[in-house]
Image (spheres, rainbow, N blue to C red):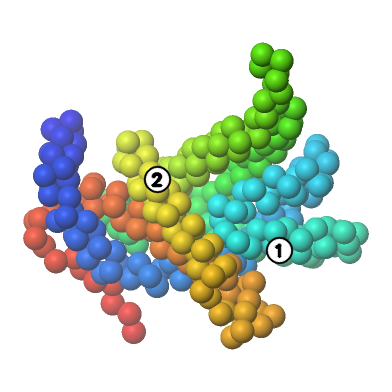
Amino acid sequence: MSTIIDEHALYVVKHPGTFILQTLKAFRANQGLLLAGAVAYYALLSIVPLMILIVIVLSRLVPQHVLLTALAHLLQWLVPGQATALVHELANFLAHRAVIGWVLLLTMIFFSSLAFTVLENAMSLIFVHRVVARRRHFLLSALLPYCYILFLGIGLLIVTFVSSGLEAVGAEGVKLFGLHVSLQGLSRVVLYLLGLAGEIFVLTSIYMVMPVGRPSLRHALFGGIVAAVLWEITRHVLVWYFATLSQVSVVYGSLTMAIVILFSLEWLATLLLFGAQVISQYERFGLEPAKAAPQEIKTA
């Protein structure tokens, strides 16, 4: 097995352009953009119910305004430029939480899991060589989204404590040779690096858990780093574009926020699935001829 892994790495190092081209061809053959659109659509349906459920549960442990502040920091990574507006709408809904009944609660639980279910199905198409050899039990697939929701809630709780602590340290600063030195810049850098590390961790966990089979941690980490770096570049470009060049508010009016969030989610889903395609292409090296044309998914 180590020989195969060495051959994989050696091939990628010697022929990076060929490997990227093969990955792009396979991504196109798997209808990657179509899959990303489906994931983004269901993610848009899931994001608000998911946030509502997490904040309602965690507000019993942490003040709601502190949670919303930490959630706004996290949403800057997910929907750049729209985090403040999204958290504002969430706060308005939570102000009327008394109207939430059992029917609405069950509906939110159902919709909050849709994005994970669709993502798992999209991963199955990309990692089809694993699915042929091994299938996942349907009960495990049904419970997997809710396990992810639980871990995301725990992650938000940890981020809340860490960000609050860093902001407190940055505001107080330290005394050095009798002078007060502000640590706000350092705390922002540390918070950004922790956010980037968390982003890579989440992406790696998706590549480890969502696809069928027993993936290698090294492969999942490689795909997570690729997707995280591409998304870091993309999200800054998106913030600049919507702030300077975009006329989306003129075209869509009151629908602007939903359109911008959907557009951001589709880019994120595309990069997420492309990272999965990188892992899949790396794994399939040696299992089929190097110049074999990828089998395309036929659509009606």
* Residue 46 appears in view: no
Can you give x and y, in whole percent of width and height, for residue 203 in the image? Answer: 45, 46
Residue at the (32%, 36%) spot, across then down: 218
Of 43 and 194, nearer the camera is: 194
Return the residue nearer the eye: 35 or 70. 70
Q: Is residue 125 left or right of residue 53?
A: left
Tell which residue pokes out farthest to the right in this image. 98
Q: How many marks?
A: 2
> In this picture, is 156 found above or below 142?
above
Please report the residue visible at 12 percent of the width from the left and 49 percent of the height from the top.
15
Q: Quadrant of residue 260?
A: bottom right
Q: Which amino acid does label 2 sit on?
A: Gly
Quarter that holds the C terminus: bottom left
Reading the image, the residue beneath label 2 is 224
Q: Earlier in the sequence, mark 1 or mark 2?
A: 1
Q: Position of residue 183 (x, y in %)?
A: 65, 30
Mark 1 is surrounded, within 10 Å at the Cα level, by few (under 14), some (14 to 19) or many (20 or more) other residues, namely: few
Quarter that holds the N terminus: top left
Looking at the rendered structure, which numbered label has been put on residue 85? Answer: 1
Where 2 falls versus 266 (above or below)?
Answer: above
Calculate the distance from the C-alpha at mark 1 to the C-alpha at mark 2.
28 Å
Residue 101, quarter of picture? bottom right
| Residue projecting furthest to the front | 178
Residue at image position (83%, 63%) is 92
